[in-house]
Image (spheres, rainbow, N blue to C red):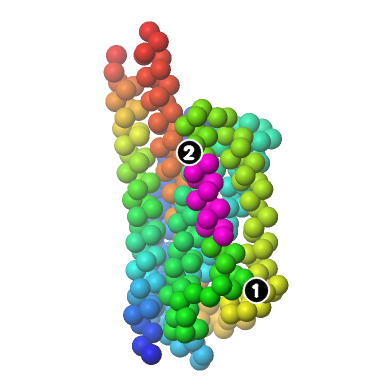
C-alpha cells in the first residue's frame, strides 16, 4: 500500500478526489460537534460551563501529538525506503501539527483561567506540550534550510524520528509530575467523563482529524505541483 | 465568574487557527496547481 502510493501520479489520482471529501466531512463533523458541545450537554458540577472547551482542546492536543507521530512515521519511511513522497508528507504534516499544538496551548490557557485561576503554570503537561510546539518550529526551520541548500532531507528525517522521544513525555507527564493539569480522563477503552458530556467529542475529534488529513493532502499537492514547475523550468532553461 | 467569554475566546481562536490553516493550504495548492497547468499548456 505505502509502496503503491509512493508513485506521485498514483498518489495524485487518489488525493484529488479525497481532499474535498475529507475537508467537508471534517467541517460537518466539527460544526455539529461544536454546536452540540455548546448547547446540548450539561455543565460540569465542578468546572461549570468552561468544560465545553474540552471539545476543541482534546482534539487539538491529540492532533498536536499525533501529528508528530505521523511526521516521524513519514521520516522513518523516507530513511528506510527513500520514497520522496514520504519526505514531502513530513513537510506537509509539520505546519498542521504545529498549529494544533499551538491551539492546544492557547485553548488550554484560556480554560485554565476560570478553572485554575491562572493562564499559565510551569506544570509537566503544559511545559512538555510547549516544548513539542518549539520542536515543530525547529523542525520546520531545519527542513526549510535543508531544502534551500539542496540537501537530501536526511537530517530533518533523523530529527523527526528522534523527536518521538517527546511523545511519551507529554503523554505521561500527568502521571510523572502530578502538579496542576488533571490526570488522564479519556483512555482508549474507557473514560471518567460522563457519557452525557462526552459524546460531542466523538464528532469534533474525528472531524478535526479529517480536516488535518485534508490540509496534509492540499500541502502535498502544492509541493508536487511546485516541483513539477521547477523541473519544467529547468528543462526549458537547458534547451 | 462568567465562563462564556472564555469559551467563546477558545472556540474563536480554534476557528481562526484551523480556518487560517485550511485557507492558506487551499490557496497554496490552487496557486501551485494553476501554475503547473499553465506551464504544461505552454508549447
Q: Is residue A135 above or below residue A7?
A: below
A132 relative position to A190: left or right = left
- The CA span between labels 1 and 2 is 34 Å
Where's residue B18, x and y in %?
39, 58
> Where the C terminus of chain A falls, by quadrant?
top left
Where's residue A69, x and y in %?
61, 52
Q: Secondary structure at mark 2?
A: helix
Q: Which mark is residue A174?
A: 1
Where's residue A224, x and y in %?
45, 32
Q: Residue at x 60, y 32 (%)?
A: A83
Q: Chain of mark 2?
A: A
For disc 1, the neighbor class at 10 Å (few under 14, some 14 to 19, many from 20) is some
Q: Is residue B25 above or below residue B34?
A: below
Where's residue A156, x and y in %?
58, 40
A239 relative position to A139: left or right = left
Residue stretch in magenta: A131-142
For disc 2, the neighbor class at 10 Å (few under 14, some 14 to 19, many from 20) is some
Q: Quadrant of residue A5?
A: top right
Q: Residue at x 46, y 35 (%)?
A: A12
Outermost top residue: A239
Q: Which residue is mark 2?
A: A144
The answer to whether any part of residue A100 appears in the image is yes
> Where the N terminus of chain A falls, by quadrant?
top right
Q: Which mark is residue A215?
A: none
Asked whether disc 1 touches disc 2, contact meaning CB atoms under 8 Å apart, the reply is no
Q: Secondary structure at mark 1?
A: helix
Amino acid at each position: 500500500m505505502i509502496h503503491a502510493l509512493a508513485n506521485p501520479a498514483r498518489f495524485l489520482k487518489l488525493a484529488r478526489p479525497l481532499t474535498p471529501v475529507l475537508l467537508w466531512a471534517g467541517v460537518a463533523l466539527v460544526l455539529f460537534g461544536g454546536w452540540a458541545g455548546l448547547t446540548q450537554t450539561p455543565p460540569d458540577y465542578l468546572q461549570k460551563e468552561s468544560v465545553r472547551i474540552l471539545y476543541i482542546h482534546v482534539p487539538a492536543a491529540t492532533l498536536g501529538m499525533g501529528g508528530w507521530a505521523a511526521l516521524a512515521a513519514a521520516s522513518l519511511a523516507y530513511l528506510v525506503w527513500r520514497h520522496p513522497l514520504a519526505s514531502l508528507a513530513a513537510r506537509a504534516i509539520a505546519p498542521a501539527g504545529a498549529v494544533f499544538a499551538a491551539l492546544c496551548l492557547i485553548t488550554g490557557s484560556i480554560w485554565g483561567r476560570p478553572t485554575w485561576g491562572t493562564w499559565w503554570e510551569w506544570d509537566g503537561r503544559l511545559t512538555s506540550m510547549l516544548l513539542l510546539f518549539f520542536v515543530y518550529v525547529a523542525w520546520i526551520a531545519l527542513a526549510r534550510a535543508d531544502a534551500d541548500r539542496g540537501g537530501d532531507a536526511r537530517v530533518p528525517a533523523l530529527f523527526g524520528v528522534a523527536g518521538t522521544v517527546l511523545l511519551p513525555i507529554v503523554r505521561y507527564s500527568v502521571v510523572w509530575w502530578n502538579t496542576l493539569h488533571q490526570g488522564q480522563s479519556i483512555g482508549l477503552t474507557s473514560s471518567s467523563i460522563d457519557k452525557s458530556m462526552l459524546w460531542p467529542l466523538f464528532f469534533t475529534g474525528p472531524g478535526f482529524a479529517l480536516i488535518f488529513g485534508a490540509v496534509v493532502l492540499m500541502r502535498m499537492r502544492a509541493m508536487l505541483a511546485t516541483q513539477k514547475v521547477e523541473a519544467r523550468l529547468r528543462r526549458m532553461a537547458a534547451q | 465568574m462568567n465562563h462564556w467569554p472564555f469559551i467563546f475566546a477558545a472556540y474563536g481562536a480554534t476557528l481562526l487557527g484551523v480556518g487560517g490553516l485550511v485557507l492558506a493550504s487551499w490557496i497554496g495548492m490552487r496557486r501551485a496547481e494553476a501554475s503547473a497547468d499553465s506551464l504544461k499548456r505552454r508549447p
